[in-house]
Amino acid sequence: MTSYPKEKINVLLLENIHENALNLFKNDGFNVTLLKDALLEDELSEKIKDVHILGIRSKTNVTKKVLENANKLFSIGCFCIGTNQVDLAESEKKGVSVFNAPYSNTRSVAELVIAEIIMLARKAGDQSRDAHLGKWNKIATGCFEVRGKTLGIIGYGHIGTQVSVLAESMGMSVIYFDIQTKLPLGNAKTCDTYEEALKNSDFITFHVPESEDTVNLLTKKEISKMKKGSYILNLSRGKVVSIPDLADALKTGHIAGAGIDVFPEEPKSNKDPFVSELQNLPNVILTPHVGGSTEEAQKNIGSEVANKLIRYINNGSTSFSVNFPNLELPLLKENYRILSVHKNQPGFLRDINKIVSDLGANINSQFLGTTSEIGYLIMDVNKNIGDKVREEISKHSFSIKTRILY
Ligand code: NAI
């Protein structure tokens, strides 16, 4: 065996990451420490010196200073969606792969969208508030079934497609618009233009990423194309819908209701106040960016990220890494695997191949991927040339990190 012994691989999990992750690492033989809180830059800079795998959520910042001390670090797992708390460019240059869990909460968002569609159609949010205040407001006017109504989904990706399936099962007709060609699920129909989706929907729901093209995707111009009395939902990103324009359309009654979970400016913590032009408007459901916040999503995040990290350590797979070339090479029996992170410079592959053949091994498979900064190479050789090959590759001036497995 040439792989580094698992019991010597130190995994540090911060911010009370779900116990699912802890158990996966423990069961695979890693040496795991779980801490409840985030660590500040200075504390982490000290602690990181002995850490091979770091697990964080959104409150720990992995800065350049932290990374300067992280000489044993192989990989960082962000047990959340975002990765902007990590200096990704610096991690990449240091040969530290970063993983996250972008799709663990897909279903949670889709379920809240479906719940809100019915709540809006029945004005149930306002009725509940009235009842709490002691008002008995039994009405049928302006309240509808969702069966037979048309839902327009803007962005038919992971969440959009889940919403599509659930909405159809409630008897809604689904149409969607996506900038990419997407396979329609069930009886959903694609629209050739965004405008076509806006014009023909009773409900419009946004499931797009934030980008230059999606900021202010819905302003008064687009709202004017929507049917009178239709509804708008945004559980994607805060800048996609213009809040002042939506507020105006709700006041005139052109839009009959809205479900909004994300805002252009959101409070940093639960202690900070929240202010929005949508507050106190009729039939508006406001939620504090909780579309993906469920116990199930937390559990899924725990196992999704831990499994990605374990696969990276065990076989070098970087599928879904956010800062490394995404590579996956099937395991070859009775072979030895060499993993190399190096500067993306011409000639490195030629030099590695020479090192390996000079040591008398035959290369049985090889897979190289590059970013503008680094190259990542997975290679299987037929002979255990163990420490010698690592030593030779590490000496190369373009080398960043080398590992040998099995
Ligand atoms: P995804 O990447 O799977 O799908 C996004 C889709 O939008 C893609 O198919 C893409 O082609 C399409 N798209 C991009 N620009 C477009 C445009 N201008 N017009 C139409 N379609 C466009 O993303 P996923 O996982 O479905 O997430 C969607 C959004 O939901 C993201 O913004 C994400 O940040 C947000 N989100 C919100 C959560 C919450 O708590 N409210 C939780 C999870 C995700």
Image: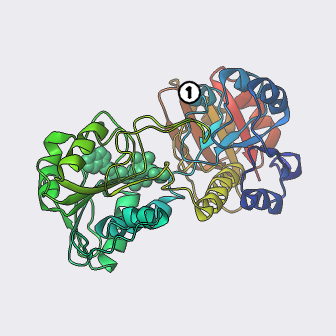
* Above or below, 71 relative to 242: above
Which residue is located at x 83 percent, y 58 percent? 26
Colouring used for the render: rainbow
**Is disc 1's CB within 8 Å of ligand 1?**
no
**Residue 384 placement (x, y as % from top left):** 78, 48
In this picture, is 78 found above or below 134?
above
The quadrant where residue 196 appears: bottom left
Q: Is residue 179 visible?
A: no
Whether residue 403 is visible, yes or no, is yes
Residue 314: % across, % down: 71, 53
Residue plotted at (32% across, 78% down): 170
Secondary structure beneath dot 1 equals: helix
- Report the number of numbered marks: 1
Task: Give the answer, above or below, for where 355 lies relative to 78.
Answer: above
Quarter of the rendering containing residue 401: top right
Q: Nearer the viewer, residue 253 or 96?
A: 253
Say few, some or many: other residues with alpha carbon within 10 Å of mark 1 (under 14 / 14 to 19 / 20 or more): few
Looking at numbered disc 1 in the image, what kind of residue is underneath it? Ala
- In depth, the one of 376 and 395 nearer the eye is 376
Direction from residue 158 to residue 121 in the image, left or right: left
Q: Residue at x 66, y 43 (%)?
A: 57
Task: Between residue 370 and residue 137, name the one nearer to us.
Answer: 137
Residue located at (57% from left, 28% from top)? 348
Q: Position of residue 264 (x, y in %)?
A: 40, 36
Residue hosting label 1: 89
Q: Looking at the picture, how far across and down is residue 281, in whole percent?
A: 32, 49
